[in-house]
Image (cartoon, rainbow, N blue to C red):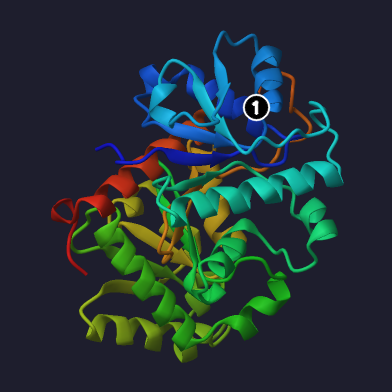
Amino acid sequence: MNAPLPLAVTIGDPAGVGPEIIAEAFARRRKAGLPPFVAVGSVALIREAARSRSLDIEVSELDKRGWDAVWPDALPVVGGFAGQGYAPGHPDEDGARLALAALELAIDRVKEGHAGAVVTAPVAKAQLATIDSGFVGQTEFLADACAMAREDAVMMLAGPSLRTVPMTVHCALADVPARLSQDLIVQRSRIVHRALRSDYGIENPRIAIAGLNPHAGEEGRMGREEIDIIAPAIATLRAEGIDATGPHPADTLFAPHKRGSYDVAIAMYHDQALVPIKALDFDEGVNVTLGLPIVRTSPDHGTAFDIAGKGIARPDAMIAAIRMAGEIAARRAAPSQSCSS
């Protein structure tokens, strides 16, 4: 299915791999079967990034023309941000400002009906924090932009082999137990359930919920979070008709013979969810934000400053993020293709 509107793909931090993997994704658009997309950022930087990879593509800045007057012969770019020249591997505040401006513009384009989804290239949180002290991550930024609670914007990592959701995300491991609650697990699991139905067309999603402690607590011998928090939350979800199971020991939940028994695994903390997805699907992993009124995906990797501009960054995750955003946007635009919530 194709999205009815082009996707808005942000440039990310210009010193990272964002500009070059966007250019590479466009170069592979036909072979990869990608929906139309518009890059948001700097036409000059994308042109330079394309040249650094010896890509024979046309990059065109949109003025009064519509994207469809350019696509698929040229990559449309909106934003007109000049940038300070292409300097891969050397992040600075100017680049962070460009990344933030591109993100804001992409969100506005979707909210105003000019784009069907936002696809975000990686940004450097530390750099963005120097210009916006409240910046935590792009997921939280999108929640704020959509005037919704950050807790209701749920990060899901999706790849060919696995889908995972971290219940807690950007916090210290020592803080995880105090942040877990029955309400949090129930609320976020409901969001995951609805999204798998509406955005992925899974009529009865199977949700496997991991324990926090080794061996899922081993009946309280290694912690009581499974008994006091996680199991009661699962009972609530099952009473609502949601196919939730667990708490499962995390060390076996991602084994090959287990992965076919569920549609998504909900983990209790960041690395418990991200280690398996990156081990299995690093080059094709997609970060999807569930629960938003707009569609947002992103490659599940960082800025990769160390390899930026060297022509070795793989575009597979960006290609997968663009494709997935197009599929979700198409399902949302065609309710008959989706399951009702």
For the C terminus, the image quarter is bottom left
Q: Percent position (x, y) of residue 194?
A: 30, 67
Q: Which residue corresponds to mark 1? A: 43
Side of 197 where 155 appears, left or right? right
- In the displayed structure, 161 sits above or below 185; it is above
> Quick one: which residue is furthest to the front in this view?
64
Q: Say which element carries label 1.
A: helix
Side of 250 where 20 appears, left or right? right
Q: Percent position (x, y) of residue 17?
A: 68, 32
- Amino acid under label 1? Val
For the N terminus, the image quarter is top left
**Whether residue 57 can be seen here:** yes
Of the pair 251 and 263, the residue shown nearer to us: 263
Of the pair 29 and 195, the residue shown nearer to us: 29
The residue at 39%/31% (across/down) is 36
- In the displayed structure, 261 sits above or below 71; it is below
> Quick one: which residue is furthest to the left in this view?
336
Of the pair 62 and 35, the residue shown nearer to us: 62
The residue at 13%/54% (across/down) is 336
Side of 109 where 325 appears, left or right? left
> Quick one: which residue is furthest to the bottom in this view?
228
The residue at 86%/42% (across/down) is 92
Instruction: Please tell me how many numbered marks the rendered image carries.
Output: 1
**For the residue carrying disc 1, how many other residues have a C-alpha within 10 Å: few (<14), some (14-19), or many (20+)?**
many
Of the pair 327 and 82, the residue shown nearer to us: 82
Q: Percent position (x, y) of residue 67?
A: 43, 30
Q: Which image quadrant for residue 28?
A: top left
Q: Percent position (x, y) of residue 173?
A: 69, 70
**Whether residue 254 can be seen here:** no
Side of 101 where 151 appears, left or right? left
